[in-house]
Image (cartoon, rainbow, N blue to C red):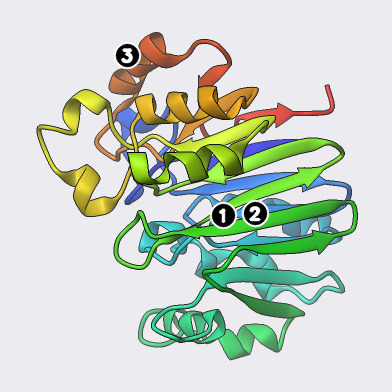
Amino acid sequence: MIVKFYGIRGSHPTPNANFLKYGGNTPCVVIRDKGKVIIFDGGTGIIEVGKELIKEDRSDIYIFISHSHYDHIQGLPFFKPFFRRSKRKIKIYGPSFLEKSYDKVLEEFLSSPFIPFSLNELRGKDSIEIITLEEKEKIFLFENGVMKTIHSKNHPLHGVHLFSYLSSSKKITYMTDIKVDDGIMKELVAFARDSDILIFDSFFLKKESGEEDESKRFGHSSFEDALKVKELSGSKMLYFFHYNPDYSDEILDGVKKEFEKNNAFLSFEGLEVNLDD
């Protein structure tokens, strides 16, 4: 099983020379496992994923969208496998919104005047299935794998889905855009329990949370929060993720010196972690 990071930035892309080392694309993390491609979120990082997948044209693709804020879906219109005829399955799992199915949410996003084609046109070119994630806990069964999702309201205004994938006795937990507080800590720790890899929202440094209220307005966590969840959950490895778009390479280098220890690492674009080693 291989986990690869294609987009690690929060809020918006950072196409700037000061952001090259860690990367400037918005969220997208990929798991490759036994012929399946499992994708967490469709930020701009998913564009590069699509370019790779059309060269293979064989693996089934499962895309799990944590929530529909722009930074988590803005790469979807440029995901090349949508435009290629193929026998493989493409399934998109995403949250309902104001009682609309995710099918309807994507219909509005993938349409004129925002883009020059529609979701229905894409469906005519490939086998695309859209599944709505409800707020109640859900388990999806794959061949040789299980995906579990829970919904948290600790991200305004409509919450966020957290994901945990288990296969071959390996567990990958993905927690983005989540505000850690005493009321939710127990649930987060239980969900992440014994993860081989924990990927966790690390938007800001704790010392900054008192200076500006981005943490309250946008519902994000700190590097310190991520470490605490790792330690309490007994997770083996932590990868910090979803960085503040104002955090340049220089700032993240400083963060790395302070926080990269005890199997806690800063993720960066192109990073691959092989759990079969």
Secondary structure of residue under mark 3: helix
Q: Going by the image, does 13 lie left or right of 169?
A: left
Question: From what the image shows, is residue 269 above or below residue 156?
Answer: above
Q: Do the residues labelled 2 and 1 touch (CB within 8 Å)?
A: yes
Tell me which label, 3 or 1, sits earlier in the chain: 1
Amino acid on which the number 1 mark rests in the picture: Ile
Query: What residue did someone put label 3 on?
Result: 254
Q: Going by the image, does 106 lie left or right of 177?
A: right
Amino acid on which the number 3 mark rests in the picture: Gly
The image quadrant where one finds the C terminus is: top right
| Foreground label between 2 and 1 | 2
Q: Determine crowd level at label 2: few under 14, some 14-19, many 20+ residues with C-alpha closer than 10 A.
A: many
Residue at the spot 47% in from the left edge and 81% down from the top edge: 105
- Residue 197, horizontal then vertical, whole percent: 64, 31
Secondary structure of residue under mark 1: helix
Label number found at residue 39: 2
Question: From what the image shows, is residue 172 above or below residue 136?
Answer: above
Which of the two residues, 53 or 202, is positioned nearer the viewer here?
202
